[in-house]
Image (cartoon, helix red, strand yellow):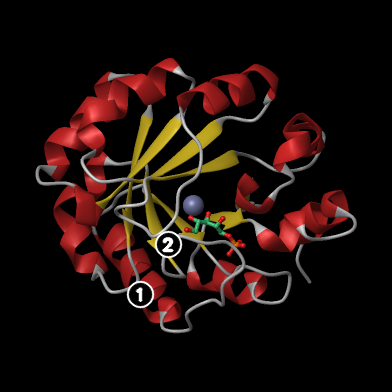
Amino acid sequence: MYKHLIAPSILTADFLHLEKEIMMVNSSDADLLHLDIMDGVFVPNLTFGFPVIRQIKKVSEKPLDVHLMIVDPDRYLEAYRDVGADWLTVHYETCQHLHRTIQKIGELGMKPAVSVNPHTDVSLLEPVLGDINMVLVMTVNPGFGGQKFIQGSYKKIRKLKKMISEGGHKTLIQIDGGVTEVNISGLIEAGVDVFVVGNTIFSAPDPHQVIRNLKNPK
Ligand code: DX5
Ligand code: ZN
């Protein structure tokens, strides 16, 4: 049976004990480790940079899924590869020459993905669906963990699923923001392949169990 993937986002993890948090993810059923990179310009928040990612790469046994919420990401594609990104997601809204950016990510040996903000129509990605490994549909406005899932996202996910199957593509659908143990089943049904989950995992008393529940929802 096809199983959806879980990508814990460390945005709301305990940064004083980051190694411990990553070890927890290593020993869990999670599939990827999601890292949120914010520049304080594209989104109203800042997170961490290259030295931190390099250290994370040393301890993570899961591939690094790096989500760039930064303007002009072209300047740094190589640098993210060098610190260990396996998947690299850029935002549609930040790329002047999206196709060129995607090509470059692939040439550097990473898996390219493109993200769309809640207000951005997924139809805009139709021309590049065959060139990317994944589309990341933001299901909250990017910038912070622990926000409420935007209900209008279901329609968008279904539309994207249809575009992918009609085009005969293998592109995965990832969502990010407000995923819980309650809404995950309906989202799998809508066609989501990869779930980024922050707060639901890292604020739980037993994060291991939560990841198990998210992998095997009722
Ligand atoms: C939001 C980030 C997310 C965030 C999701 O801008 O891209 O990855 O960590 O967090 P939750 O699951 O708490 O909504
Ligand atoms: Zn993210």
Residue 11 percent across, percent down from the top left: 60, 50
- Determine if the C-beta at disc 1 is less than 8 A from ligand 1: no
Q: Amino acid at mark 2?
A: Pro
Q: Name the side, left or right, on which 3 lies relative to 29.
A: left
Q: CA distance from mark 2 to mark 1?
A: 17 Å
Which residue occupies the foreground of this view, 54 or 8? 54
Residue 175 percent across, percent down from the top left: 48, 60
Instruction: Using the rendered image of the protein, determine whether residue 9 is visible from the camera's viewpoint.
Output: no
Residue topped by disc 1: 156
Disc 1: CA contacts within 10 A as few (<14), some (14-19) or many (>=20): some
Task: Tell me the mark number nearer the camera, choosing from 2 and 1.
Answer: 2
The mark total stands at 2
Q: Amino acid at mark 1?
A: Lys
Residue 167 percent across, percent down from the top left: 23, 56
Residue 121 against residue 84 in the figure, above or below: below
Residue for point 20% across, 30% down: 103
Which comes sooner in the sequence, label 2 or label 1?
2
Q: Quadrant of residue 143?
A: bottom left
Q: Residue farthest to the left?
A: 97
Residue for point 46% across, 69% down: 139
Residue for point 31% across, 58% down: 164
- Determine if the C-beta at disc 2 is less than 8 A from ligand 1: yes
Can you say which quadrant of the picture contains the C terminus? bottom right
Residue topped by disc 2: 142
Q: Quadrant of residue 136?
A: bottom left
Residue 72 percent across, percent down from the top left: 20, 40
Element carrying mark 1: helix
Q: Name the side, left or right, on which 203 lies relative to 106.
A: right
Which residue occupies the foreground of this view, 87 or 80? 80
